Image (cartoon, rainbow, N blue to C red):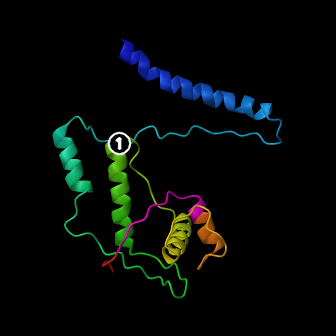
Amino acid sequence: MIIKSLKIIPGAIFILLLLSLPLAANAFQTDYIIYLPLIQKQSFSWVNTLDRDESLEFYQENYLRSEPPDIHWTGSHASCDPGTTDPDYKQAVLQRVNYFRGMAGVPDEITFSDELNEKAQAAALVMSVNGTLEHEPPETWTCYSSLADEGAGSSNLFWVSMAGKQ
């Protein structure tokens, strides 16, 4: 009984925090009112990680690949062209992200946005050319663009070498 009660506490705290946001906004006497709508999909697929067979099947179907697709990047450091990557490569990345989300028990139906991908690709070019990661790349960086700045400022940054991949 205590365990069931404890599961309710985080949700109650979260709801309390959401309800207090309009009050907190008024306390600062700003001209802005901030509302954070709680949007949650009512149903999503998830993996019962307590079931070894289900976990193994999900792993084999969604994580393992016989041969990972090549990246086929079409950009250029020399001309500061962010380019794009192969659609099969993007799909493999998306499948991998959704695999980990499904195993974590959160919605595993994430999709890509062409607009956000373009910003992320521009940010990746700037980071690659300059050899470092930065959420706020300076305008003095080689291949800097406002698109890259927007992408860098709203992304989780991670460095991985694709040496040897085409």
Q: Is residue 161 magenta?
A: yes
Q: Quadrant of residue 138?
A: bottom right
In this rendering, would 118 be left or right of 85? right
Viewer-nearest residue: 75 or 99: 75
Viewer-nearest residue: 20 or 110: 20
The amino acid on which the numbered mark 1 sits, given as a three-letter code, is: Ala
The residue that label 1 is drawn on is: 104
Residue at screen point 66% across, 76% down: 140
In this view, the residue farthest toward the bottom is 78
Residue at screen point 55% across, 29% down: 14
Percent from the top left, x then y, of residue 66?
Answer: 19, 66
Relative to 130, say whether 18 is above or below: above
Percent from the top left, x then y, of residue 146?
Answer: 65, 71
Viewer-nearest residue: 75 or 139: 139
Q: If the image is split into quadrants, where does the C terminus sit?
A: bottom left
Viewer-nearest residue: 6 or 55: 6
Q: Is residue 78 magenta?
A: no
In this rendering, would 129 be left or right of 99? right
In this rendering, would 106 be left or right of 68? right
Residue at screen point 47% across, 41% down: 41
Residue at screen point 31% across, 75% down: 70
Percent from the top left, x then y, of residue 56?
Answer: 18, 47
Percent from the top left, x then y, of residue 36?
Answer: 64, 39
User: Bounds of the magenta span?
Assistant: 152-162
Relative to 60, say whether 9 is above or below: above
